[in-house]
Image (cartoon, coloured by chain):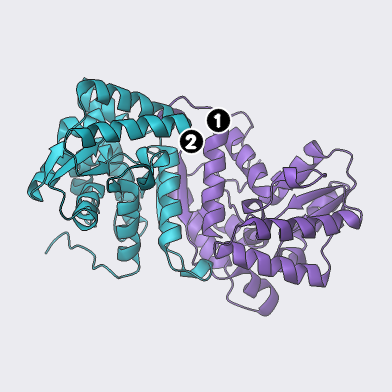
Chain colours: A cyan, B purple
């Protein structure tokens, strides 16, 4: 696991993997090799403002996890997937994409939704990785307006600083509802900070948590319920 | 970090490290290399019943963390410290002991307490690592009776299986109060499952959480506020 982006989101992801694992005792649980590295260069700054490229750092982390015996890689951070080509170039084990897991969870949880609202970071949306995956799945993306995106980024920043109170939840719910008002029939919480404040019950609409989608896939793969994708078929 | 013993306790420890780190954004947080390995052979079975020795597995985990660049080692599991000599023999970086951190936290938080109640696993108490550390600090240990220890072990097992409800908290509080009734002037929660159900506020007595004590020390060491102990002076 390439973790720490952000720290609380990684812990939330690990807790969900543990909760989703059927276990009567310690030894039934899944081994996770975690490089919890919050000091990866800022993904937003790299995508939007020419800041330091986090790709080489992510690639080095991934290579070390592979050398330590990892069978596959996961990253509980959506935006970091913008740099997945650097990781793939440095490793030979599968990288299980949170983007693909979330889009496929949307197909399962909201099979009739043709328009999917995306709550994700500016950098993630600018790179278009979610929009492309949804288009490949025959879905339309409903995006935040520029003003909503500013609010979302401010909210994510405050969640990263530990503010996960009811006010943050209400503000996040408001951003989701704005997408619904513009036609979204389901929402993907495509940033792992979002599920720290927003749960599905808060909306009348299917809400796909990228954290939950990746955790479910991780457990399925680790327990052999889902076959591991082959990097070199 | 040698983690996964148990899984929820490791996540709790990581969350406490994150919460104790002064940070305005991701990049201010501490990097943690975590081998979250719940499949380490059962520590209780090894100490009490001649089961497989977890020492070699812990040593191999520690050596790999050192090779991956770790500056020091922590284990958010008290009983695993019974096998610390195996880890020390396989590595050259410091192992920051949860036992020492907890006994020193007791000296700070309960300076006048001469008798310290110990809630810890059968294996941990049988090995005597807490009793020795407390004796070296000039304190007496107040231990659970055989019956209380049976109850404590059953409770820890149910916490590991995810039962962290109010009933578990009440039962754990009862075990702490039994030690107080026999003269304990402070309690060390010397098993990282215990703070998952029991908080200090539940007692009229100082309650030292071994998880919190190790988390505070880890943050202090990682931020350079506490000098790193030297393995080879």
Relative image position of residue A118 (x, y in whole percent): 22, 38
**In the picture shown, does residue B127 fall above or below B70?**
below
Q: Is residue A63 left or right of residue B133?
A: left
Q: Is residue B13 left or right of residue A137?
A: right
Q: Earlier in the sequence, mark 1 or mark 2?
A: 2
Q: Which of these two is toward me, B23 or A148?
A: A148
Q: Which mark is residue A172?
A: none
Q: Is residue A11 left or right of residue B163?
A: left
Q: Quadrant of residue A143?
A: top left
Q: Are marks 1 and 2 on the same chain?
A: yes
Q: Quadrant of residue B107?
A: top right
Regarding residue B232, the answer to whether it shows in the image is no
Q: Quadrant of residue B142?
A: bottom right
Query: SS class of the residue under badge 1?
Result: loop
State if disc 2 and disc 1 touch (CB < 8 Å).
yes
Relative image position of residue A69 (x, y in whole percent): 35, 60
Relative image position of residue A57 (x, y in whole percent): 30, 37
Q: Please name the residue shown 82% across and 45% down the image.
A: B205
Query: SS class of the residue under badge 2?
Result: loop
Circle 2 crowding by C-alpha within 10 Å: few under 14, some 14–19, many from 20: many
Circle 1 crowding by C-alpha within 10 Å: few under 14, some 14–19, many from 20: some
Which subunit holds the residue at mark 1? Answer: B
């Amino acid at each position: 696991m390439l973790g720490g982006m952000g720290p609380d989101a990684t812990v939330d992801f690990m807790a969900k993997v543990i909760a989703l694992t059927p276990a009567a005792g310690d030894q039934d649980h899944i081994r996770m090799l975690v490089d919890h590295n919050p000091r990866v260069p800022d993904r937003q700054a790299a995508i939007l403002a020419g800041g330091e490229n986090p790709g080489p750092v992510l690639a080095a982390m991934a290579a070390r996890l592979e050398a330590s015996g990892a069978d596959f890689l996961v990253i509980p951070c959506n935006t970091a997937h913008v740099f997945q080509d650097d990781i793939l170039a440095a490793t030979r084990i599968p990288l299980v994409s949170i983007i693909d897991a979330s889009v496929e969870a949307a197909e399962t949880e909201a099979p009739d939704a043709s328009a999917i609202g995306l709550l994700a970071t500016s950098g993630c949306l600018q790179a278009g990785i979610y929009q492309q995956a949804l288009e490949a799945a025959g879905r339309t993306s409903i995006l935040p307006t520029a003003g909503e995106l500013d609010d979302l980024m401010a909210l994510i920043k405050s969640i990263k600083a530990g503010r996960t109170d009811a006010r943050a939840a209400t503000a996040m719910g408001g951003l989701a509802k704005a997408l619904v008002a513009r036609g979204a029939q389901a929402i993907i919480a495509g940033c792992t900070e979002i599920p720290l404040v927003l749960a599905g019950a808060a909306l009348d609409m299917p809400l796909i948590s990228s954290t939950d989608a990746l955790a479910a896939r991780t457990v399925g793969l680790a327990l052999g319920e889902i076959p591991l994708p082959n990097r070199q078929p």
